[in-house]
Amino acid sequence: MLKFNAFYLVLLATPFPMALPPLLALAQLPTGTTDLPPTLAPQPDRAMTVRYPTTKVIPQSDKYHDKLIDDPFRWLEDVDSVDTKDWVVRQNAVTFEYLKSAEQRNAIKERLTELWNYERFGFPSKHGDRYLFTHNNGLQNQSILYVADSLEAPRRVLLDPNTLVTDGTVALTGNVPSDDGNLLAYALASAGSDWNTWRVRDIATGKDLDDKIEWVKFSSVAWTGDNEGFFYSRYDKPSSEGEFTGVNYFQKLYYHRIGTPQESDKLIYQRSEEKEWGFGGVVTEDNQYLIISVWRGTEKRNQIFYSKLSDKSSRGATNVTQLLSGFDSDYQFIGNDGSLFYFKTDKAAPKRRIIAIDIEQPEPERWKVIVPESDETIESVSCFGDRFFVTYLKDATSVVRQVSTSGKQLADLKLPSLGTIAGFGGKRTEKETFYTFTNYITPPTVYRLDLNDNSATTWRQPKVAFDPADYVTERVFYKSKDGSRVPMIVSSKRGLERNGKLPTLLYAYGGFNISITPTFSPANLAWMDLGGVYAVPNLRGGGEYGREWHEAGMLHNKQNVFDDFIAAAEYLIQEKYTNPTKLAIQGRSNGGLLVGATMVQRPELFAVALPGVGVLDMLRFHKFTIGWAWVNEFGSSEDSEQFRTLLAYSPLHNLIAGRRYPATLITTADHDDRVVPGHSFKFAARLQACQSGPKPTLIRIETSAGHGAGTPVSKLVDTAADTWAFVLKNFETE
């Protein structure tokens, strides 16, 4: 096992953002001259229900290969300008006034508050003689980190983020105890930013040391076995103007010794000629090796380097050995027996397998297959003693199998029903581990697994103000446009009659090899309480069926993702769940792109669209923060062929003046430094200019918030109440 549960890579920290897709002929796109009115004041020939604020148009055009593309709202990319801040205030004033008028909002918020008010526990982890775990009593903005001498001993507060600021906008984003359990390295992020500041706390006294590590993104820390320090990765300090929008290049791996200033940290590894390379460092459980996973963008193809740690004086670039190079596949280190390293990989196995490599004889022909590829996709692997716990995905739900380190099949872990399993952390020598089980109608329950006899007992089971027996969730399959078979999980209150009139929310992601599996959400339960159907298809572009499923929905195949989503909507209509006047679509980040592209392609199919923190300008996304890393997934407008593919589905560039679009509530945050808010600002401005007919097109801009991680509970409740109220207000009534 590793010194922390998994590589903390950019692969998990970015928006998880063939022939030309048959979307719109390029001749229909506005190129060269703007067809927008000079301001966004309501036009007299429009039957508007909302009077939008004025948005100025500043002529701006760019030459992309053989096309001239207008970008009249470019000025909104500057989120710190006086004009943009004024625009945000005016847009929010209109949006919140509209939402306040929604009749059901107060009742929805009351129910959401009731549902969110339940205890939430994180996995316990043992370090030395102590256990650490997080807990939220229900409505606390941030979970508190506790320490206890045993699983049932009285706990004490180790770190409470709620005491740091009054509005709950500082979040605990990482915590890694030292091997002996005496020190805790922990990370804080403010206002939802991806920037983390790491501090060190004495666990016995609860007091911080002087250590302070800044400008860390997309990295955890890895303690050395002597407990004297840890490895971490960081970027150079950005300029004040580029803190939230500047491009992040040239990550470096450092070693920090406790009690010394960051300026004296030792540079372990960098590649000054490779600006896109990033480094995730972990220390093996036997403390003999530093494993360096080298990533480049969001495509799961990495390299593995290592360094021997026996000689402290030799730590550094001169002691780094390249084990797996070339970015040919995905390799995730599991653990080691001396020089024998275990990896989960999709090398020659699109649905992944487990292999062993002896670093003394690392030639591929000497690799040993421990767990071969199967019909199900390997999602995660943990190792205890002489056995692996292998979590598979079977049609987007979890199956857990045990396999010995020699490859012998052992007993499967019994699960309550179809759902999602997560956990299995801890040192390889431990005799216990913990995991959670959840699905769309089951709150996360934490189980303790006794590794001596494989018995599982409930450690913590939350009590939520609902009866799971009143709800039903089922898996169905449907055919996409090209005949591909796509799974979808549909959940609702039990006993609803399929009359073609049920209010229905269709949510999906479809990208970055990320698997969308069943997870409990108070917000989605509240939607079902309102009589709504909640449907989640597993689109191509995700990781549910391995690398081939992912690649079928990326780059020039991206249109497949939109086709899968449209086919899901058509299935729900065909099967008499709903109709276009009662159907809403929702997605966030890459899912925000999905909603934006789909509502532009098939506006008549949906009553409401909810694109959240979306990648909506596909020609310029790579110019901000970590956006360059998504080129592996989307392509780049700087490549002539990829440009034509991107232009064909880019939500911003496919809006057409005079067309009727669904009622739209765009959501973003002013401190989102992953998918910068300029995407949503520009899309909202153009959509308001193009919309014909009475459906409102609004933008809700959260302040002191980011891409989503660490959002205070109070803001989550308000956002969900606003969202469901907007949806119901814009569904047609009988």
Image (tube, grey):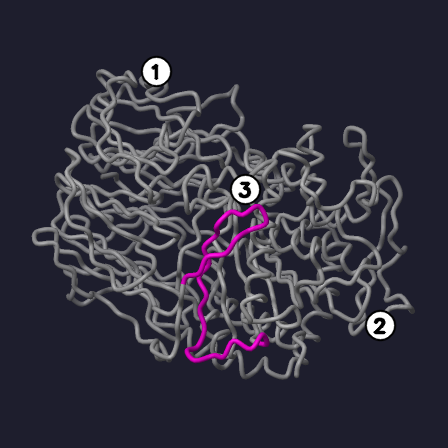
Q: In the rendering, at what x and y percent does residue 205 appear?
A: 24, 55
Which of marks 3 and 2 precedes in the sequence? 2
Give the numbered dot on residue 553: 3
Q: Nearer the viewer, residue 447 or 143?
A: 447
Q: Residue at x 66, y 51 (%)?
A: 597
Determine which of the numbered discs, if any, sits on residue 47 in the image: 2
Question: Which residue position is annotated with label 1?
Answer: 318
Q: Which residues are magenta?
A: 475-501
CA distance for labels 2 and 1 = 69 Å
Q: Does the magenta segment cover residue 487?
A: yes
Which amino acid, mark 3? Gly
* Disc 3 residue crowd, few under 14, some 14–19, many 20+, Cα 10 Å: many
Of badges 2 and 1, the one in the foreground is: 2
Q: Amino acid at mark 2?
A: Ala
Mark-to-mark CA distance, 3 and 1: 40 Å
Whether residue 583 is situated above or below residue 645 in the rendered picture: below
Q: Earlier in the sequence, mark 3 or mark 1?
A: 1
